[in-house]
Amino acid sequence: MQYDIVVSGGGIAGLAAAAAFGAEGYAVLCLDPAPPVTNRDAEGADLRSTAFLQPAQAFLDEIGLWTRLADHAMPLEVMRIVDAGGEEAKARVTKEFKASDISNLPFGWNLPNWLLRREFVAHLESLDTVTFRAGVGTTSLFTREAEARVGLSDGTKVRCKLVVAADGRNSPMRNAAGIDVKTTRFGQKALAFAVTHPIPHDNVSTEIHRTGGPFTFVPLPDLDGRPSSAIVWMEEGPNAEALMGLDTEAFEDAMTTRACSLFGPLTLASRRTIWPIISQHADRLSGERIALVAEAAHVVPPIGAQGLNMSLKDLSVLRDLARQAGGDIGNRKMLDAYHQKRIADIRARVTGITLLNRTSMLSAQPLRDMRAKGLDALYTLKPVRKTLMQLGLGARGT
């Protein structure tokens, strides 16, 4: 069969890509070997959450997705950074970065990933231009100057003008295109789960830095009448595996201690998931008739809400270039321009977040003391603080 665009990958970025290009009137086929899990309590549900920063929210609104999400979103008005790197697990430096310092809008809006999949899939079903096939993946790629031919896991082949590889950090389409990656491994793993707590979060996202990596609270709507947050807890690999093996009571004690009891005793409100932490970026973002987006192009540790927001910036740039390409979407000029427009920002953000992660992992007490002093100094310099917030946001405040 013939399509304008084949999107390899039906995660959040892949579904957003299908929605974006479907809204432009292109005939889109979106494929994923695993059917999306759209129920919070189902096995395999993605219990992480995503904070859509201002530029990403604007893009989702443009492509027709935000109307499905707005009622579920928690606004993030304040980002709090806590250094708890002293001898005891207690907050010793706390700094709050307020969206109102740079904008009349929140920093972003937080939603659980399983809900995003549910709403994105429902939206695709409403688009006549998009075909979404769950349970079918991409297996091979053959390109010529005028088109690409993609082999599918069901044994069939399809033809298209552009392949959008949104198929993850081990991207089959990137590998088929012969594009290499540079990978940094930290020996870390991250646990993701949801909790309830007696002290309200007041729409504040809180990162607590001690050692091993940050412990991050991201606000969620109340659960059974109690304040609730999504947690990402990064630790050195063996420690993370040990935490996964604790029974519920012991795990709740451990996470309450690690959180410095800032929100009172924490109660586990979901199952736990775990995954390895890496940084990675592709040497090139495009090849003949193929563009890499999201984790096929870049992977960063979950710090500062950068990962999926970078992914949506990829899609925004690619969509805009497609508009300029006219009928020849996926031509060499368009894809070379995509690489040039995105590669510097991606490399800078991967490098910066890698550095932040290594800083958060520090275990030696003198180095942790230096980290606390650095946080205090950066916050004190208001112009520097504002610039850092704007860079993290990905746009100047409005």
Image (spheres, grey):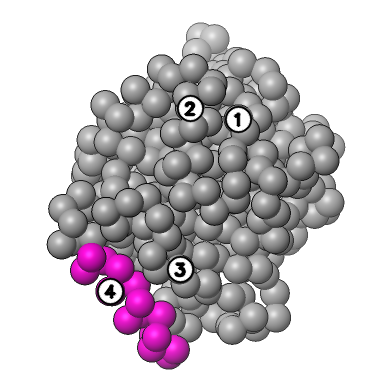
Residue at 66% of width from left, 56% of height from top? Answer: 201
Q: Which mark is residue 373?
A: 4
The local secondary structure at tag 4 comes to helix
* Quarter of image, res 237: top left
Q: Main secondary structure of the magenta part?
A: helix
Magenta stretch: give its range: 369-384
- The residue beneath circle 2 is 251
Q: Which mark is residue 94?
A: 3
Q: Which mark is residue 268?
A: 1
Q: Residues within 10 Å of mark 4 (few under 14, many from 20)?
A: few
Q: Earlier in the sequence, mark 1 or mark 2?
A: 2
Q: Earlier in the sequence, mark 4 or mark 2?
A: 2
Instruction: Determine contact: label 4, label 1, CB under 8 Å.
Output: no
Residue at 82% of width from left, 40% of height from top? Answer: 225
Q: Position of residue 55 (x, y in %)?
A: 60, 67
Q: Earlier in the sequence, mark 4 or mark 3?
A: 3
What amino acid is found at the position of numbered circle 4 in the picture? Lys
In front: 351, or 24?
Answer: 351
The local secondary structure at tag 2 comes to helix
Q: Position of residue 212 (x, y in %)?
A: 29, 44
What amino acid is found at the position of numbered circle 1 in the picture? Leu
Q: Earlier in the sequence, mark 1 or mark 3?
A: 3
